Amino acid sequence: MNIHKTKGIVLRTTKYGETSLVVSVYTEMFGIQSYLINGVRTVSKKGGSKANMYQPAALLDLIVYHNDLKNLQRIKEAKWSQLYQHIFSDVWKNAVSLYMVELLQKTIKQPEPNSDLFQFIEDAFLHLDVSDINIVANFPLYFAMHLAGFFGFRLADDYSPDKCILDLREGEFLSEHPLHPHFLENQYSYITSQLLKTMQPSELSEIKINQDTRRILINAYQLFYSLHIQDFGTMRTVPVLQAVIS
């Protein structure tokens, strides 16, 4: 069993026994991995618990034991890679971060490393942490649209006044309605094209979206993912997200 240094993003934490955790982490070196962490749910003499480090969306620097033949790995050392200023304490940013985490859980299935994907996710959480409310409200839409590209079903960014109907099943803009009901049109397809053109989260403040439009788009993008990922299902964070940021 070899020892490696890697960054990791916590996706899910499950209690195990009296004091331990099983933590699902998207690592830069090994992709998604599960780690058994013993004794972290006890309170130290300093009054804290190491379990706080394994909250969903936490960015960690890890030293891990790795064995390709095992489904459950071990962590030798862990520390914060970046300590958020707001994500764990701000209601809006926390709701968005949990939506992002659930989307990652539903899309990342295989333990394959992808450094570009890892960097995109890490940058997204760091931007979310320091963004103002106008950007935070549009952040889930931006993240969902750009994440899709890493899994091979990014929407074709070829919107025009003549091709203004977005076919969610085929992932392209059309000039005529498709023969199925899974499409967007009017301002919804236009805003989607604007989100696809957004390269940095800081640009999101320029996209003006009202509450109803944002709600419709969040539901449409959930449908978009369910059409392209088998057993995607529905996202439990969507109702919470809509209640908080709309």
Image: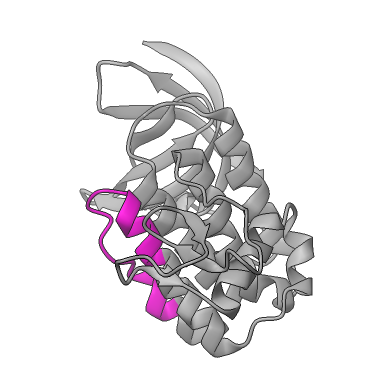
| 200 relative position to 15: left or right | right
Residue 34 position, x and y percent, is: 33, 36
| Magenta stretch: includes residue 140 | no
Residue shown at 67% from the left, 67% from the top = 86
- What percent of the width, then of the height, locates residue 166? 49, 65
Of 143 and 156, the residue lying toward us: 156
> Is the residue 7 above or below the residue 177 in the image?
above
Locate residue 210: give its quadrant.
Answer: bottom right
- Find the magenta span and give its range: 222-240
Q: Is residue 176 visible?
A: yes
Residue at left offset 35%, top offset 35%? 35
Residue furthest top as drawn:
1
Please determine whether, in this image, residue 82 is positioned above or below residue 232.
above
The scheme the figure's colours follow is one colour
Name the quadrant of the N terminus.
top left
Q: Relative to the observer, which residue lies in front, 54 or 195?
A: 195
Residue 227 included in the magenta stretch of the image: yes
Whether 39 is drawn above or below 146: the answer is: above
Instruction: Identify which residue is drawn at 67% across, 47% down.
Output: 123
Q: Is residue 47 visible?
A: no
Give the answer, above or below, for where 25 lies relative to 241. Answer: above
Q: Nearer the viewer, residue 13 or 246?
A: 246
Closest to the observer, 114 or 30: 114
Q: Is residue 2 left or right of residue 226?
A: right
Q: Position of residue 145 (x, y in %)?
A: 54, 57
Q: Residue at x 58, y 29 (%)?
A: 115
The C terminus - image quarter: bottom right
Q: In x, y percent, where is residue 116?
A: 60, 33
